[in-house]
Image (tube, rainbow, N blue to C red):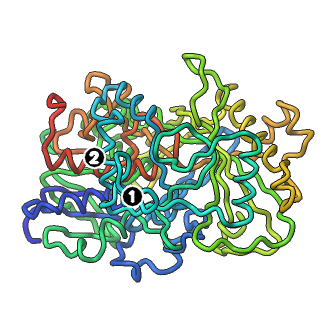
């Protein structure tokens, strides 16, 4: 492709890979896809270590396909958040969990000034992106999309015990967590098929798509800032092997992820004026919402000890999943339906962090999370030097409700392990012990000391009306307010995190914004 690209996409992850695939379906549109990581061609290019759905490369410290971001979950709790640095982004290194956002999430985002995001409007895109291998085509599911979805099998002894324990405690069956039915226990919709994690890159950009004459890929190139001239984005400054160059384009889409994308905006002079002036970056557009209030989901890991060997999982590290409702207060006084999650790991945590499916004698785990939308985080630029990372505070556990929700989900997990189905295969929860479980103050302290995160960051460049710059940086089609020719297309644009993991929603964002670009939609047409 010798001509100047119509669109330069920064980031080949869950949204960027989708954009590149869909936009190049139009032969007259020329697209350049740039990523700091490797862009393999087909399964062989990824290799078995990235494809094995029984492993989670993102849990392995210093994995070459990841980038580590230093953050603070609370003032006393530093953490490393790992994001994918390879074709498919974090869908290449995550657990393969592919659960749709809830209907209430879409309605909440629509009510925040984004009417095109109501559930009924996005459902066709949700169907279009998937091939549901369990339920097939219907009003809810598709059978022609690039993402192949299959639910985890509950045949492993630990998964069967989880199912029976949840039933014994009265939780409803939830066989399809993508159908918006009342939450309960069920298998996990996943893009792991026959033991292979079919990431978004592999699904949307197979070799035949990467070979399209109107698509150019630049791997190993790191974007440094967007070039804006006369109020319009005209390219990207990128670096490769110590050499910097300007990649020119008619328009630019940032799909670098919810931590890297806002940093690029800030480095480009798009962000809170005072913060930009403090570090000496010329202000292109005063955008106070960039990095101001992002959200994620706090998580703790609960280990339990099996009685003897239960065998290795065959297809996925994931077992069953229980969603239940908290009693945390909301403005309307009601609990959010299914805002707590108990996710089962069939591989020991020691194996997930070391890249081994089996670790003899190691405990198995539940990953328990509060999924209530809570935009408490803040990302601030520290330097005009792009090699200086931003300052990232998650500000977890800021209210009594935050701790109340986590206490509730920890206690339900302990109750599950006390049921007869688990007693047959388990000698119980390792910690916290009963004395801590029964004492709110002691359990609060245990949670603080063991706090982690689901790595579901959203909302660092949220969408909303242009006249509400304190709360919105882009419109509902990802167009950056105040800068022509520049869009954001990743989970940065969600006003807050959905009440499920956001991988499926990240792919949806790619589909939705690709459609907007192809149709040249305007807000007034909705």
At horizontal 67% and vertical 60% (from top left) the residue drawn is: 345
User: What is the residue that sits farthest to the top in this orientation?
Assistant: 332
In the rendered view, tell whether residue 440 sits above or below residue 392: above
Q: Is residue 316 visible?
A: yes
Q: Which residue is mark 1?
A: 136
Secondary structure type for disc 2: helix
At horizontal 17% and vertical 56% (from top left) the residue drawn is: 7
User: What is the residue that sits farthest to the bottom in this orientation?
Assistant: 44
Res 21 → quadrant: bottom left
Left or right, residue 183 beside residue 275: right
Secondary structure type for disc 1: loop
Work out which quarter of the rendered image holds the N terminus and state it. Answer: bottom left
At horizontal 28% and vertical 39% (from top left) the residue drawn is: 282
Work out which quarter of the rendered image holds the C terminus and state it. Answer: top left
Q: Nearer the viewer, mark 2 or mark 1?
A: 1
Q: Which numbered dot is residue 512? A: 2
Circle nearer the N terminus (2, 1): 1
Disc 2 from disc 1: Cα separation: 22 Å
């Amino acid at each position: 492709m010798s001509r100047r690209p119509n669109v330069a996409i920064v980031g080949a992850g869950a949204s960027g890979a989708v954009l590149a695939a869909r936009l190049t379906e139009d032969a007259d549109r020329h697209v350049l896809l740039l990523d700091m990581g490797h862009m393999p061609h087909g399964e062989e290019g990824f290799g078995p270590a990235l494809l094995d759905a029984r492993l989670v490369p993102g849990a392995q410290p210093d994995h070459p396909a990841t980038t580590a971001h230093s953050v603070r979950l609370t003032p006393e709790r530093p953490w490393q958040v790992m994001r994918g640095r390879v074709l498919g982004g974090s869908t290449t290194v995550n657990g393969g969990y592919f659960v749709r956002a809830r209907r209430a999430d879409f309605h909440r985002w629509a009510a925040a000034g984004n009417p095109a995001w109501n559930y009924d409007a996005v459902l066709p895109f949700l169907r279009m992106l998937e091939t549901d291998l369990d339920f097939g085509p219907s009003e809810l599911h598709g059978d022609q999309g690039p993402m192949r979805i299959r639910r985890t099998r509950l045949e492993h002894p630990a998964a069967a015990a989880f199912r029976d324990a949840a039933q014994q405690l009265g939780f409803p069956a939830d066989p399809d967590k993508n159908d918006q039915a009342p939450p309960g226990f069920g298998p996990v919709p996943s893009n792991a098929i026959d033991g292979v994690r079919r990431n978004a890159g592999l699904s949307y950009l197979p070799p035949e798509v990467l070979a399209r004459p109107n698509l150019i890929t630049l791997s190993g190139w790191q974007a440094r800032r967007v070039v804006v001239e006369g109020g319009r984005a005209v390219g990207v400054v990128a670096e490769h092997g110590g050499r910097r160059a300007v990649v020119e384009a008619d328009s630019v889409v940032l799909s670098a992820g919810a931590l890297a994308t806002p940093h690029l905006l800030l480095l480009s002079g798009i962000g809170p004026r005072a913060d930009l002036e403090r570090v000496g970056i010329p202000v292109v557009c005063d955008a106070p919402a960039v990095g101001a209030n992002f959200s994620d989901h706090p998580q703790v890991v609960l280990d339990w000890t099996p009685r003897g060997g239960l065998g290795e999982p065959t297809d996925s590290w994931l077992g069953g999943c229980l969603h239940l409702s908290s009693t945390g207060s909301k403005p309307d006084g009601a609990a959010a339906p299914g805002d707590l999650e108990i996710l089962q790991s069939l591989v020991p945590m020691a194996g997930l962090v070391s890249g081994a499916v089996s670790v003899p004698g190691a405990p198995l785990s539940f990953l328990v999370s509060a999924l209530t939308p809570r935009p408490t985080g803040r990302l601030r630029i520290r330097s005009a030097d792009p090699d200086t990372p931003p300052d990232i505070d998650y500000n977890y556990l800021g209210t009594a409700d935050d701790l109340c929700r986590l206490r509730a989900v920890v206690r339900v997990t302990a109750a599950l392990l006390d049921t007869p189905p688990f007693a047959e295969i388990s000698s119980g929860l390792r910690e916290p012990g009963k004395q801590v479980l029964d004492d709110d103050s002691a359990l609060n302290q245990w949670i603080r000391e063991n706090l982690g995160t689901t790595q579901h960051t959203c909302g660092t460049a949220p969408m909303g009306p242009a006249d509400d710059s304190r709360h919105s940086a882009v419109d509902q089609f990802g167009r950056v307010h105040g800068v022509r020719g520049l869009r954001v297309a990743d989970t940065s644009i969600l006003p807050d995190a959905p009440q499920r993991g956001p991988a499926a929603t990240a792919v949806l964002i790619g589909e939705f914004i690709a459609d907007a670009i192809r149709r040249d939609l305007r807000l007034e047409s909705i």
